[in-house]
Amino acid sequence: MILMVVENSGGKISKSAYELASAARQLGREGDVVALVLGSAVGSVAAQAALIADQVLVADTSSLGQYDAELWAAAVAQIAREGGAHTILIAASRSGREYSPRVAVKLDAPLLEDVFTLEAVGGALQAERYSFLNRVTERIETDAPVAVVTVKPGAFAAARPASTPAEQFDVDLELPARRLAITGRTTQKSERISLTEAEIVVSGGRGVGSPQGFTELIEGLADQLGAAVAATRAVVDAGWRPYSEQVGQTGKTVQPKAYIAVGISGAVQHLSGMNKSAVIVSINKDADAPIFKITDYGVVGDVKQVVPAIIRELRK
Amino acid sequence: MRVLTIVRQVPDSEESLKITDGRVDHSGRKLVLDTMDEYGVEEALRLRESGVQAEIIALAVGPPQVEEALRTALAMGADRAVLVETEIALDVISLSSVVAQIAASEQAELILCGGQQADWDSHALGAAIAERLDWPQATWTSALTLKDHRITGVHDADDASESFEMPLPAVVTTQQGLNEPRYPTLPNIMRSRKKEIRREQLETFGVTAKLRVVGVEIQVKERLKKIVDGKDVAEAAEMLVNWLREEARVIA
């Protein structure tokens, strides 16, 4: 069987579950697609999962109310073993990336990380992924009998839900005790569209000058375009913007239809988080800035003049 | 206590990449200690400076030239180093077995590891090591303190920043923001030359690679590079908006 772990939070199924279902269907390996739902009060998540899988296994228990890498890994490995899964699909979210290696070690299986294609080739499994800070595409292969795969968000189209739901089964899990205690939580909520889902991203670097400059120029332009807001590491380090908005090697990776880089010189670490964007737009005063080497449409000029002019132009 | 910091050597991110014989070719290229691992070495030093009695061991697995990255870690202040020599590019899950065996033989109680490796773009090493040793883990840590054999800190989760607490032994993966790594001073560079690097051979660890890389390709998307001078701001803005509306069709 192909086991897919259905990510969910706050009682809602995550978009990634539909993408995993697509990856599972396109894989070309035999076996049912079995969805595993882990959590507490996840009845509606399981009901939605039943429309994209051949079978749903549900562990709905208060002990799974809060995500934990060790618990999740134990649960997934147990179900994979009991069901004889040959392929285990996990979303490459922060949590997925964190517990999937544990699953691979438990099952003595290879881990194919952050893949954007996945196919059975003869008895082997092949996948493509990026490496070297998103600059190289690698094709990796394994012929191990069991493989753990994390799937890059947005790489597969969302599966269309069926009209008749698959059967659901409750499962009993042997879970270890928690060792990592979460003692506090700060959620960075934003009224804006999420950075990784937005079609347009407006991103600001140190060139915007100040936190106020960021608000006026970056948020101003984003408001006008209905876009998400992003920032470089330098801006986040300076405390102008929250870490949740950071794009780059140590932040988020985005692939929007248009990425508008304002006052960003273009360090490789930043480029690795956005260089797959369909269209890259840059505004920078330095014509020699590296960002212009990967720019489709650009303006060389003072961002404090150019951005307000663009906003005026858009309002016309 | 002993602290193990994992050190990896990666291409300088400012340098271009080339491919020879189906592999990314490092010959003639500048290789550096992975920035993510620098945070780990620095954090180990800071824990010691905060009063924790610790011996800091830097560990690398790779070809002989990885010694340079270990020397950097030693010059920053690590006490000694272990280099497991191999020309084989091991996958992360296999590599974690080597690290776990060294950690066990060194009786390490804390392992610091980069949150992402700049060559594999992998996030898996820390968690895989933790699983091998049956230790807890905290990933993407941005603050860390160690007291009475317990670690407290802050790390990034899916959509939130969380504060956490866990007992030792444990694995912690690092990220930008955790600290500002120090530059080795000249006296420390001189001193580090006398520090011990123990060499081991991969063959003695009984691991085989679980993944093969069957193709690599450098991704270069050709960009249009239509750049307008913004001296006349209104004209430049009009031109840009026009491109985005009429040509790229990315805005309404």
Image (cartoon, helix red, strand yellow):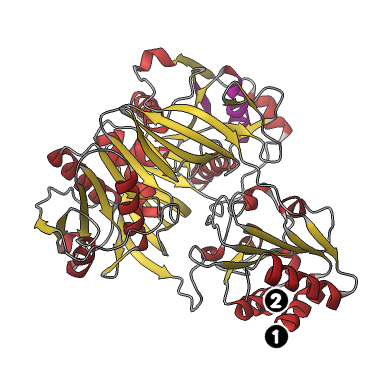
Disc number for residue A315: 1
- Taking the spot 78% from the left edge, 79% from the top edge, the residue there is A309
| Mark 2 residue element | helix
In this picture, residue B11 sits left or right of residue B171 = right
The type of residue carrying mark 1 is: Arg
- Taking the spot 63% from the left edge, 49% from the top edge, the residue there is A269
- The answer to whether mark 2 and mark 1 are in CB contact below 8 A is no
The type of residue carrying mark 2 is: Leu
The quadrant of the picture occupied by the N terminus of chain B is: top left
Residue B184 figure quarter: top right
| Mark 1 residue element | helix
Residue labelled with disc 2: A217
Residue B163 figure quarter: bottom left
Q: Specify whether residue A228 is in view.
A: yes
Question: Of the residues tagged 2 and 1, which is closer to the observer?
Answer: 1
> Most extreme residue toward the bottom, as rendered?
A316
In this picture, residue A54 sits left or right of residue A268 = left
The quadrant of the picture occupied by the C terminus of chain B is: bottom right
Q: How crowded is mark 1: few (under 14 residues within 10 Å), some or many (20 or more)?
A: few
**In terms of depth relative to the viewer, which is nearer, A221 or B136?**
A221
Q: Is residue B219 above or below residue B251?
A: above
Reply yes or no: does residue B114 show up in magenta: no
**In terms of depth relative to the viewer, which is nearer, B90 or B71?**
B90
Q: Where is residue A273 in the image (x, y as percent from the top left)?
A: 58, 53
Q: Where is residue B109 in the image (x, y as percent from the top left)?
A: 36, 37
Q: Chain letter of disc 1?
A: A
Which contiguous range is marked in magenta?
A: B65-83
